[in-house]
Image (tube, rainbow, N blue to C red):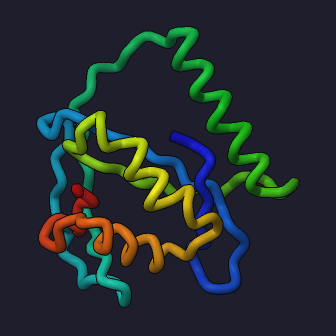
Amino acid sequence: MTGGAATLRAGDAACPLNYFAVRDPSGVKVKPVDKPPLHNGFRHVKLSCTFDRPQATQESEQVAKQLEEEGRRLCAGRPPSTAAFLLTIGLTIAREDKFFHDAVMAHPGQGWDELYQRMKDLGCRADSMDDATP
C-alpha cells in the first residue's frame, strides 16, 4: 500500500512510507544481527525472502508506477532518493487495510519513533517488534 509518509529523523522532510504485507510467514526469515538496539528500541535484522520471482504483469507494472508517483509527490520536487517501508509478516488480509490506516494514514508525516510506538499501541506484540510482525 502506498500514500503514507514519515520523517526518519527530527527536522527532516517527510519521505514516502510504503507498506508491504507478507501473508505467509514461511516466505520470510527474520534473523537478528549482532548489533546493539538503536536508541528507540529498534533491532537490526536481516530479512531473507524465499519468494518465487514472478513475471511482470500489467498489475505489477501499475503498482511499480504508483510507488514511483507517490514518491515524487511526497518528495515535493526533490529526488525521491529516500523511502521508508513497513513490512508485516503473517497479518491476515482482513486486518491489512485497518492496520495501514490506523498506523500510517491517520498520522501523516509522523516520525519513525512515533510509528514504532503507535504499532505497539495498536497491539503489535512487544516480543515481535524486532521483526515488525503484529
Against 16, is 39 above or below? below
Res. 30 image quadrant: bottom left
The residue lying at 24 percent from left, 35 percent from top is: 23
Q: Residue furthest bottom?
A: 39
Res. 127 image quadrant: bottom left
The residue lying at 34 percent from left, 40 percent from top is: 21
The residue lying at 45 percent from left, 71 percent from top is: 115
- Count of numbered circles on the image: 0
The residue lying at 31 percent from left, 74 percent from top is: 121
Against 91, is 122 above or below? below
Between 48 and 10, the residue placed more toward the observer is: 10
Against 35, is 56 above or below? above
**Is 20 left, or right, of 57 in this rendering?**
left
**Is 122 left, or right, of 81 in this rendering?**
left
Q: Residue furthest right?
A: 77
Percent across and percent down for residue 76 are 84, 57
Quadrant in which the C terminus is drawn? bottom left
Percent across and percent down for residue 50 are 21, 32
Percent across and percent down for residue 20 are 41, 42
Res. 15 image quadrant: bottom right
Between 115 and 81, the residue placed more toward the observer is: 115
**Is 86 left, or right, of 50 in this rendering?**
right
**Is 119 left, or right, of 108 in this rendering?**
left
Percent across and percent down for residue 36 are 24, 84
